[in-house]
Image (tube, rainbow, N blue to C red):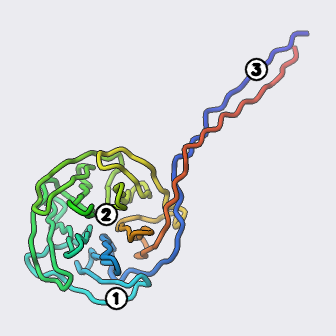
Amino acid sequence: MRVFLIVVFLLPVVNIAGSVNVLSSFYSPDWFPNGLAWDGNYLWLLGGHYDTFYKLSTDGSVISSFTPSEPGGKNGDGAAFDGTNLWGMFIEHTSYPGEVYEYTTSGTYVSSFMCSEIWEFGMTWDGNNLWVSSRSAQMIYQMSKTGTVLSSFSVPHANPMDMAWNGTHLFYAAKDDKLIVEVTTDGVIIDTYDVTSISSDMKPTALTFDGNNFWVSDQEHNIIYEVELFDVSLQQSTFGRIKTLFQ
């Protein structure tokens, strides 16, 4: 009788996705909650239906709002706050470049510039410059307040949406992949966070960081969530099975 030992190795199991924990939530006051910014005390939402900025308490109460007059835009998308003023991304049509407008928190127009790529969407402020995402080009651009491109990098996710800055890294909402993506300023992906734990059909769109936690909108259900993001270290487990055959 001959004995054969066959060792069967399965592929490593790798888990690199971070987890998302919901702390609170409320319904958006506008359809298409596309842009979120944090001013140190309040949230600012830029809605894509009424193209309006809403100043919100963290329980969702509307403190004030304004709809930008010309030279404002249509289809309000990403939003940012630079410590003094609000910035909003507007797209007249999907075949036109996005336009960035700066307003005071009371709605007075300050400045604007046109982006170079078509269909820009998200925005954030890093303390010195703006960061803008382009859905059409799958790019992220670092820009001055006058629209000068300072640096850029490509991203692997289709339709990068609104952005956030936590003081160290950038984050963007990847709507199609249902992820929040953490990335360095030169484009290296640090981690991804799966939002399907919140809702299986969630479409993460607006995003901001309040110094402690993140706020993300679900465009599918018009809900804004306060969330914690938890890193998950790369884990690999290799399993083997020994099977003995007798002949």
Secondary structure under the numbered disc 1 in the rendered image: strand
Q: Position of residue 170 (x, y in %)?
A: 34, 56
Q: Which residue is mark 1?
A: 62
> Mark 3 vs mark 1: which is more N-terminal?
3
Q: Residue at x 21, y 71 (%)?
A: 88
Q: Position of residue 54 (x, y in %)?
A: 29, 83
Structural crowding at the residue carrying mark 3, measured as other residues with C-alpha within 10 Å and reported as few (<14), some (14–19) or many (≥20)? few
Structural crowding at the residue carrying mark 2, measured as other residues with C-alpha within 10 Å and reported as few (<14), some (14–19) or many (≥20)? many
Q: CA distance from mark 3 to mark 1?
A: 67 Å
Q: Residue at x 33, y 76 (%)?
A: 40
Let me know if residue 89 appears in the view: yes
Q: Position of residue 179 (x, y in %)?
A: 44, 57
Residue type at mark 2: give it. Answer: Asp
Q: CA distance from mark 1 to mark 2?
A: 21 Å
Q: Is residue 96 or residue 101 the one in the foreground?
A: 101
Q: What mark, if any, has residue 6 been given in the picture? A: 3
Secondary structure under the numbered disc 3 in the rendered image: strand
Residue type at mark 1: give it. Answer: Val
Q: Which residue is mark 2?
A: 162
Left or right? Give the position of 67 relative to 70. Answer: right
Q: CA distance from mark 3 to mark 2?
A: 52 Å
Q: Residue at x 50, y 66 (%)?
A: 228
